């Protein structure tokens, strides 16, 4: 994180005093073209000194029938003043023919990250290369230089950073540099005025936050253009929890919506059902 975003001397001790423990486990449904295509569980455990957050996604409905896709991400670390200092980030995903596991560790002295990724066949375990990927018809991206990785955090820690900057220091615009193990980009978020919104037939007090992606390194020109044209809007609850209620991602080609469906912190059953194997869910539904 850039020091200018977080190391505001007049807020340092105030923010430390405001910091509190928070534990959340939230279930979301993902809609695309009016169809339920995936479920997402977000877990967050945070104290004044450390955080441990994760995200798990599974395809659902027709999307699951066509492509059983799963993805998991996590980030653990501490805080330096207001900014997250990640120690390790993991990312794993799998489809019927391709799977990936990546671990990114951070040097505790200078915060520099180093990523190691393994590509393999999910059934046979055979090693794969980037050239084996079915969507790869271009040259492999160049490694991100150290000077661009310096100060950048993983995507999960980036969410923690932006959320904390808004919640605890009242910033209206937050820029977070991100390195995801392959590419480098910034996310710039702008906080709107509190309002009421009807989401899934419930009227809520929310704070809208609009986000844009600015590619920095490792993107093909047309991918850069698509990312610059994309935008996201997140409606956070207007209370001390400040949790995402709805996330809308859109560009000229598509729009998807992620809605909060259940709060598993108080009732774990919906998230326990999320973790069940597909075959078990089918048998229970019969």
Image: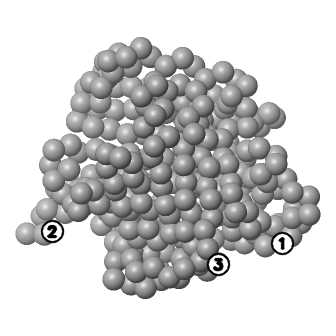
Q: Nearer the viewer, residue 213 or 99?
A: 213
Q: Which residue is mark 3?
A: 240
- In the image, residue 148 lies at what x, y percent? 68, 28
- In the image, residue 151 lies at what x, y percent? 73, 37
- In the image, residue 214 lies at what x, y percent? 57, 39
The Cα atoms of the two marked residues, 2 and 3, are separated by: 38 Å
Residue 163 can be seen, yes or no: yes
Residue 131 relative to residue 19: left or right: left
Say which quarter of the image contains residue 160: bottom right
- Rendered view: 43 above or below 100: below
Q: Which residue is mark 2?
A: 284
Residue 267 can be seen, yes or no: no
Residue at (61%, 41%) from the top-left corner? Answer: 186
The Cα atoms of the two marked residues, 3 and 1, are separated by: 14 Å
Residue at (31%, 49%) from the top-left corner? Answer: 254
Residue at (77%, 44%) from the top-left corner? Answer: 2
Residue 222 relative to residue 60: left or right: right
Q: Quick one: which residue is furthest to the bottom in this view?
A: 203
Cβ atoms under marks 2 and 3 closer than 8 Å: no
Q: Which residue is mark 1?
A: 17
- Helix, strand or loop at mark 2: helix
Callout 3 environment at 10 Å: few (<14), some (14 to 19), or many (20+)? few
Q: Nearer the viewer, residue 158 or 187?
A: 187
Task: From the image, state whether disc 3 or disc 1 is nearer to you.
Answer: 3
Callout 2 environment at 10 Å: few (<14), some (14 to 19), or many (20+)? few
Callout 1 environment at 10 Å: few (<14), some (14 to 19), or many (20+)? few
Quadrant for the N terminus, please.
top right
Colouring method of the image:
one colour
């Amino acid at each position: 994180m850039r020091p200018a975003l977080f190391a505001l001397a007049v807020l340092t001790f105030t923010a430390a005093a405001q910091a509190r423990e928070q534990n959340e486990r939230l279930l979301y449904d993902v809609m695309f073209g009016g169809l339920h295509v995936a479920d997402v569980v977000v877990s967050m455990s945070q104290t004044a000194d450390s955080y441990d957050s994760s995200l798990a996604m599974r395809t659902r409905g027709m999307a699951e029938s066509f492509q059983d896709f799963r993805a998991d991400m996590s980030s653990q670390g501490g805080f330096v003043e207001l900014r997250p200092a990640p120690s390790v980030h993991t990312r794993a995903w799998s489809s019927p023919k391709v799977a990936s596991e990546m671990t990114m560790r951070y040097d505790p002295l200078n915060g520099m990250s180093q990523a190691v990724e393994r590509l393999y066949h999910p059934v046979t375990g055979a090693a794969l290369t980037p050239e084996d990927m079915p969507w790869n018809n271009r040259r492999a991206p160049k490694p991100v230089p150290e000077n661009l990785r310096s100060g950048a955090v993983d995507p999960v820690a980036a969410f923690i950073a932006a959320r904390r900057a808004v919640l605890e220091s009242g910033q209206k615009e937050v820029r977070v540099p991100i390195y995801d193990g392959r590419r480098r980009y910034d996310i710039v978020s702008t906080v709107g005025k509190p309002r009421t919104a009807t989401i899934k037939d419930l009227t809520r007090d929310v704070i809208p936050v609009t986000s844009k992606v600015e590619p920095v390194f490792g993107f093909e020109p047309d991918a850069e253009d698509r990312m610059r044209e994309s935008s996201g809007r997140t409606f956070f609850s207007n209370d001390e929890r400040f949790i995402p209620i709805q996330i809308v991602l859109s560009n000229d080609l598509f729009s998807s919506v992620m809605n909060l469906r259940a709060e598993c912190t108080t009732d774990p059953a919906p998230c326990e059902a999320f973790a069940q194997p597909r075959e078990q869910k089918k048998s229970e539904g019969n």
